């Protein structure tokens, strides 16, 4: 976290915000019981904290929810502003799971055929976002944020019984981004 945020001290967010944060097991249960979303499901927070350094005063969060997404909407290459990392065990581009990352956040999507995920076009998304912790550019930030998101997504998928196609931490050792298409 220090490398990403340049902060050394963190604290929980205020009490009202902390009530939104759920342990992985409870979040998994909530997601499994949720009804099929029209577009985006209810957001469940897994992590939410603030920097308490004098030089930075931003926030960091990880959340998850179901979303409707057609395969034609999947990102198949990186761009100037986003780096796309395939996260499946076979590492094929244009399929789930994958992460789309920038200096300030990551969207990670995966198939999880439980609850609403039994519907073919409903995808489990894990979002990692930073606010006011991105005052410098670092070419490693998208990869570092993706590794944090992957860890949360992997634990959530394991809890929900759908981790079979998302790469394990060992398989993620050499994370290779998809190339930028002109």
Image (cartoon, helix red, strand yellow):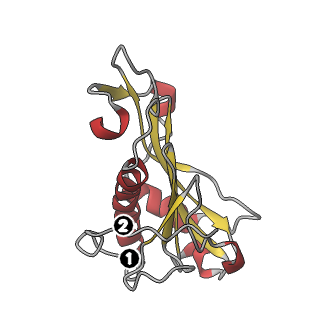
Mark 2 neighbour class, 10 Å CA radius: few under 14, some 14 to 19, many 20 or more: many
- Relative to residue 9, is residue 111 depicted above or below? below
Relative depth, front residue between 49 and 108 = 108
Image spot of residue 102 (x, y percent):
51, 50
Numbered badge on residue 46: none
Numbered badge on residue 154: 2
Q: Assess whether mark 1 and mark 2 are in contact (beta carbons under 8 angstroms).
A: yes
Which residue is found at the position 33% from the left and 18% from the top? 53
Quadrant of the frame with the C terminus: bottom right
- Relative to residue 69, is residue 137 depicted above or below? above
In the displayed structure image, the side of residue 138 where residue 83 appears, left or right: right
Which residue is found at the position 69% from the left and 72% from the top? 73
Outermost left residue: 170
Which residue is found at the position 63% from the left and 73% from the top? 74
Relative depth, front residue between 18 and 133 = 133
Quadrant of the frame with the N terminus: top left
Image spot of residue 108 (x, y percent):
50, 62
Relative depth, front residue between 22 and 122 = 122
Residue at label 1? Answer: 163
Outermost front residue: 182
């Amino acid at each position: 976290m220090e490398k990403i945020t340049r902060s050394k001290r963190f604290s929980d967010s205020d009490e009202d915000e902390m009530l939104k944060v759920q342990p992985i097991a409870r979040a998994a249960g909530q997601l499994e019981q949720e009804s099929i979303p029209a577009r985006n499901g209810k957001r469940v927070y897994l992590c939410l904290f603030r920097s308490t350094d004098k030089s930075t005063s931003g926030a960091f969060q990880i959340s998850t929810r179901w979303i409707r997404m057609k395969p034609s909407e999947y990102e198949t290459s990186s761009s100037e502003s986003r780096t796309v990392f395939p996260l499946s065990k076979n590492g094929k581009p244009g399929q789930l799971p994958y992460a789309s990352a920038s200096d300030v956040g990551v969207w990670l999507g995966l198939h999880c055929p439980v609850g609403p995920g039994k519907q073919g076009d409903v995808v489990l998304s894990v979002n990692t976002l930073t606010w006011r912790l991105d005052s410098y550019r670092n070419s490693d930030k998208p990869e570092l944020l993706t590794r944090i998101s992957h860890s949360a997504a992997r634990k959530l998928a394991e809890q929900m019984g759908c981790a079979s196609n998302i790469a394990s931490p060992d398989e993620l050792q050499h994370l290779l981004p998809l190339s930028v298409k002109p």
